[in-house]
Image (cartoon, rainbow, N blue to C red):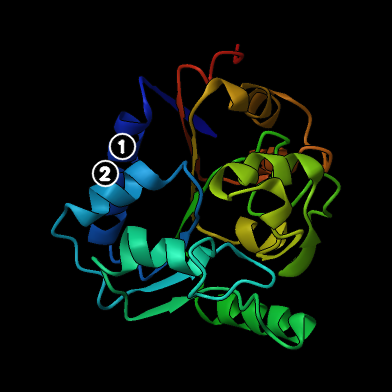
Amino acid sequence: MKVITVKNAQEGGKIAFTLLKDKMAQGIETLGLATGSSPETFYEEIRQSDLDFSQMTSINLDEYVGLDETNDQSYAYFMKQHLFEAKPFKKSYLPDGKAMDLEAAAKDYDRIIIENPIDFQILGIGRNGHIGFNEPGTPFDETTHIVDLAPSTIEANSRFFDSIEQVPKQAMSMGIASIMSSKTIVLLAFGSEKADAIKGMVDGPVTEDLPGSVLQNHNDVIVIADEAAASKLA
């Protein structure tokens, strides 16, 4: 695991963009994408670039249960606004949070990931160490699944909604095993509220109590953290 400390999110986004550009020059085909505030500067760099994604595939980590792409709090909407309108892909996959049969939709998503191996996965990390929506206690061998969101996650995400009551209580998420199958993983973390999670992820024991710690077992992980998020590292 390589840790790159940056001054701010803007610098972090530029470095992540450079890593992506280098991998694209090597011919990668599939990107794993994340939502939330952490990758926003990364997507901004992509939008301002001349990179062409028209022959590439994207696969997103997760989606809220009950929201579709017309809801401005859905992750499908987020991706459209932050990336896809400016840089369309050959094919973009997101979990179907409105599926009538959520378990069947999760199995279909696993098939998509198997058929389109992820070359370059972007991640954030939650305050409680979750990656994707894999909350503490998620088995490391879990694939795509339906998640009951932890109270701390609901609280953290409530800043995007008019009230905490509007935050969905479930999500469909790519599993930890699915994430770990990615060839390269780039994790972005900005702000002091992420410092404990980064400390545990990098220096702590590998434990399902802190899902991000499993990344210690991956052979190609780059962590890009600002000084605040990296402040508790040795």
Residue 19 locus on image (x, y percent): 32, 45
Label at residue 15: 1
Which quadrant holds the C terminus?
top right
Looking at the image, which residue sits at the far left?
50
Can you tell which quarter of the image residue 6 is in?
top left
Q: Nearer the viewer, residue 180 or 108?
A: 108
The residue depicted at 67 percent of the width and 29 percent of the height is 197
Residue 84, placed above or below residue 188: below
Q: Amino acid at mark 1?
A: Ile
**Residue 22 seen in this snapshot:** no
The residue depicted at 59 percent of the width and 15 percent of the height is 233
Residue 234 placement, left or right of 35: right
Looking at the image, which residue sits at the far front?
162
Can you tell which quarter of the image residue 27 is in?
bottom left
Q: What's the CA distance linking mark 1 and mark 2?
A: 5 Å
Residue 229 locus on image (x, y percent): 53, 22
Marks counted in the figure total 2
Residue 59, placed above or below residue 20: below
Q: Amino acid at mark 2?
A: Thr
The residue depicted at 80 percent of the width and 47 percent of the height is 150
Question: Disc 1 on helix, strand or loop?
Answer: helix
The residue depicted at 71 percent of the width and 60 percent of the height is 168
Residue under numbered circle 2: 18
Tell me if label 1 and label 2 are in contact, CB under 8 Å.
yes
Q: Nearer the viewer, residue 174 or 168?
A: 168
Residue 183 locus on image (x, y percent): 50, 58
- Mark 1 surroundings within 10 Å by alpha-carbon count, few (fewer than 14), some (14 through 19), many (20 or more): some
**Residue 65 seen in this snapshot:** yes
Q: Nearer the viewer, residue 48 or 58?
A: 48
Residue 85, placed above or below residue 47: below
Residue 128 locus on image (x, y percent): 73, 35
Question: Disc 2 on helix, strand or loop?
Answer: helix
